[in-house]
Image (cartoon, rainbow, N blue to C red):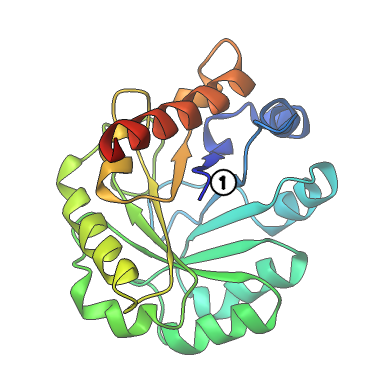
């Protein structure tokens, strides 16, 4: 499967979001998803953007939106993002009251359902819950702020998830978010990640579109070396 690159608009210029979405989405080598971090200043200390901005972005870009909801009470608020047209809506298991029902509601509203776990949250208690989800988002930084350093210890969770997928126990796409850059993406790929969220590594580059392609090329090259 082609490695998926999902630039995070948390690192983009908020005054130019439509342009920032376009610059990473052009051409066959452009972004696969556009990662949108929604923070409510309750579940995490920071406050970013919400549903109205997502609705505007949906009109401005054809790139599928990957909405990562770092919010309290996702059971109430998350389905609205699916109804608006987000491709993938991810909620935190630490915040969801009924994650199984929430997954069903997200799918019924037309989105893929994603479940995220913080760096300190173990994977094993939620394996059965993940059978109802399409995406597992492993946080490789503490949620709430961009630009943090990658936490390599979370890759053990990625490896466990990869084994569960490869043996047929789960059918989820494995995504990682936090500190992904040229220096860390190969380790994440080797552990079994399918989709890589990258913020500063893309929007901090002189050519964000080229940065997306370069990260994907790095994963493909690494896969070729390991399999060869």
How busy is the neighbourhood of tag 1: few (under 14 within 10 Å), some, or many (20 plus)? Answer: many
Residue ranking furthest to the top: 206
Which quadrant is home to the C terminus? top left
Look at the picture and state if 23 lies above or below 114: above
Residue ranking furthest to the right: 59
Residue ranking furthest to the front: 228
Name which residue lies at 60% across and 78% down.
Answer: 106
In the image, taking residue 164 as reference, residue 30 lies left or right, namely right
* Residue 86 horizontal/vertical position (percent): 69, 61
Can I make out residue 185 in this image?
no
In the image, taking residue 15 as reference, residue 119 lies left or right, namely left
* Residue 107 horizontal/vertical position (percent): 62, 79
Q: Quadrant of residue 218?
A: top left
Task: Check disc 1 and report its element: helix, strand or loop.
Answer: strand
In the image, taking residue 149 as reference, residue 55 lies left or right, namely right
* Residue 224 horizontal/vertical position (percent): 36, 34
In the image, 78 versus 48, the foreground residue is 78
Q: Quadrant of residue 104?
A: bottom right
Look at the picture and state if 209 lies above or below 189: above
Can I make out residue 133 in this image?
yes
Q: Which residue is mark 1?
A: 35
Name which residue lies at 59% across and 29% down.
Answer: 12
Name which residue lies at 50% across and 56% down.
Answer: 40
In the image, 9 versus 1, the foreground residue is 1
Look at the picture and state if 95 lies above or below 46: below
Q: Quadrant of residue 184?
A: top left
In the image, 116 versus 163, the foreground residue is 163
* Residue 175 horizontal/vertical position (percent): 41, 53
Q: How many marks?
A: 1
């Amino acid at each position: 499967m082609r490695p998926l690159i999902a630039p995070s608009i948390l690192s983009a210029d908020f005054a130019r979001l439509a342009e920032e979405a376009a610059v990473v989405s052009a051409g066959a080598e452009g972004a696969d998803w556009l990662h949108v971090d929604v923070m409510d200043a309750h579940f995490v200390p920071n406050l970013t953007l919400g549903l109205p901005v997502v609705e505007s972005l949906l009109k401005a870009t054809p790139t599928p939106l990957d909405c990562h909801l770092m919010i309290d009470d996702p059971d109430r608020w998350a389905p609205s993002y699916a109804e608006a047209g987000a491709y993938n809506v991810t909620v935190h298991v630490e915040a969801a009251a009924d994650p199984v029902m929430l997954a069903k509601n997200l799918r019924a509203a037309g989105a893929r359902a994603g479940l995220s776990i913080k760096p300190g949250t173990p994977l094993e208690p939620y394996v059965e819950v993940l059978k109802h989800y399409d995406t597992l988002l492993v946080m490789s930084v503490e949620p709430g702020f961009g630009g943090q350093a990658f936490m390599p210890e979370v890759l053990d969770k990625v490896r466990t998830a990869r084994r569960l997928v490869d043996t047929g126990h789960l059918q989820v796409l494995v995504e990682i978010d936090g500190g992904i850059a040229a220096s860390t993406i190969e380790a994440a790929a080797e552990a079994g990640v399918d989709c890589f969220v990258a913020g500063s590594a893309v929007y901090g580059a002189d050519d964000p579109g080229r940065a997306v392609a370069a990260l994907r090329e790095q994963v493909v090259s690494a896969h070729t070396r390991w399999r060869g």
